[in-house]
Amino acid sequence: MFKKIALLAAVTTLCAQSAWAGKAEAEKWINDEFQPSALSKSEQMKEMEWFINAAKPFQGMEINVLSETIPTHEYESKTLTRAFEEITGIKVNHQLLGEGEVVQAVQTQMQTKRNLYDAYINDSDLIGTHSRLQLAINLSDWMAGEGKGVTNPMLDVDDFIGRSFTTGPDGKLYQLPDQQFANLYWFRKDWFDRPDLQKRFKAKYGYDLGVPVNWSAYEDIAEFFSEDVKEIDGVRVYGHMDYGKRAPDLGWRMTDAWLSMAGAGSKGLPNGVPVDEWGIRMEPGSCNPVGASVSRGGAANAPAAVYAIRKWDEWLRKYAPPGAASYDFYQSLPALSQGNVAQQIFWYTAFTASMVAPRSEGNNTVDNDGNPLWRMAPSPHGPYWEKGQKLGYQDAGSWTLFKSTPVDRRKAAWLYAQFVVSKTVDVKKSHVGLTFIRESSVNHQSFSDRAPKLGGLVEFYRSPDRVLWSPTGVNVPDYPKLAQIWWQQIGDVNSGAFTPQQAMDRLAGEMDQVMARMQSADERANTYGGCGPRLNEEKDPSFWLGKAGSPKAKVNEKPKGETVNYDELIKRWKK
């Protein structure tokens, strides 16, 4: 009897869900929430009708997905899950955790092959891992094969601006971008435009106060505001902001292209060839990393990398506000809204949404009309940087499916993933989170209208320069295993326990040790599909430093500062 009652209740629930999941709900969401859109309302309805029909076999199912905590994912978790359930009848628990916890969950699911979550939004930084371990679903084959019936015919993969970041060495797509943001330069344009400050700066340094092109200029500007200006409108001001808390965030602070900004890697886009921004060498045409140490042809402890770490430490100590060294990623970036920092060399556009909050909410970097007093601009580069290299990092949080997820749950999760990146939804989602993934969204008229309020974000994403910012690439054979090494070594520099050279020597050595274990596992059990590391024999560093390209021999690390006028830069971007 009890079994019959339970069965009847389940059938009743399923029928109830089926009854309210459909066209009327889709039409309501299109009218009330999903505007503006790159599609007309009739096109949006056509796309939603496809989701309604494709979801019928999965109505009543409850799935679990995981992502890190940023405004874009908060919108998905709170609003888009509700829309998806009302339209398709599939309930989604979209959990939000810190980036480190997401990486840990991904690593655990890969190691145990237990289905912890039905899908993840994890950084495309793991593309080298996913393409080697073959534990993630190859989306190119999935969309053409087993997942074809649940793949949106209006998905338009070519519209995604970050698809090159999620493509493996085999040319296959392993992840689908959900949000993107770049690390750019941020500065107080209202202060830089003041004639009195311009006059004082030029008198001291011999060139114009403007957007720094190189690290020499950034350092001069940091010194100028921290030690010469000191106070603006009664507020103590500083010339630099960063963070230094001993936590995984600190490691990503560096692997997120800090070394490439200094010029440590090789020429090549989206990542250096043969040496990437991590300092890992992988020869052209090969899928086998050969080392991180200079003695093996890598650059993790080369002069450019040591210079990069030294400048990070010096600037944090000398020019940042008190307490910055104890901040983590999440604390340092919003701190700019206090209005006491002149510039930040490593600022993420993911925080644009909070930086355009009204003055009434405590944001001191907008005027009374909500216009930003700040602007974003290209990252300045260090003295080892050469034209043709990447200039910074671009996070591409991307949908990833695993083979360990049961097929029916994987299909339902894939429907949700496509829903939250669909053209029906994406322009509105982009207005909420300001993390563009589609060409059709960034070029939408609504962003032309909103651009003056966003401090250069729209101009950057429409410019040809945006390709110079990219995530970690395929040289990194196992991101979770290698990334965890970084923050401890960098933290030892900040604490004074090691010099930058000592820390980077130790870091490079540990990276090689970890890759040696990967090599052994790959040779023994094909763990990395034959694309695991194959370390070079060690040679005297002079052998590699004497060759052209990365690793690079020491250069003049303090060339003359160079700046550009921001308004002229924007004109160039708009062309």
Image (spheres, helix red, strand yellow):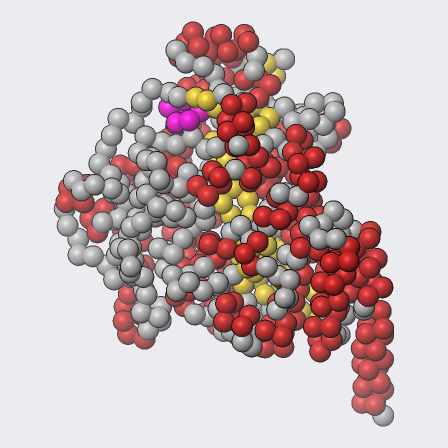
Q: Quadrant of the N terminus?
A: bottom right
User: Where in the figure is residue 225, as x and y percent of width and height?
Assistant: 50, 17
Magenta region includes residue 110: no
Task: Give the number of marks.
Answer: 0
516 displayed left or right of 355: left
Can residue 101 be seen by looking at this rendering? no
Which residue appears at 44% of the width and 10% of the height? 202
Which residue appears at 40% of the width and 53% of the height? 473
Main SS type for the magenta part? Answer: helix
Which residue appears at 41% of the width and 38% of the height? 391
User: Where in the figure is residue 444, as x and y percent of width and height?
Assistant: 66, 43
Residue farthest to the bottom?
A: 1
Q: Nearer the viewer, residue 441 or 420?
A: 441
Q: Nearer the viewer, residue 293 or 268?
A: 268
Q: Nearer the viewer, residue 249 or 411?
A: 411
User: Where in the figure is residue 572, as x and y percent of width and height?
Assistant: 50, 29
4 displayed left or right of 140: right
Q: Please tell me whether residue 564 is drawn above or below residue 204 in the rendered image.
A: below
Q: Please tell me whether residue 288 is drawn above or below residue 296 in the rendered image.
A: below
Which residue appears at 69% of the width and 35% of the height? 450
User: Where in the figure is residue 455, as x and y percent of width and height?
Assistant: 61, 30
The answer to which quarter of the image holds residue 143 is bottom right
397 displayed left or right of 5: left
Can residue 277 be seen by looking at this rendering? yes
Q: Please tell me whether residue 308 is drawn above or below residue 128 in the rendered image.
A: above
Magenta region includes residue 218: yes
Magenta segment boundaries in residue numbering: 212-219
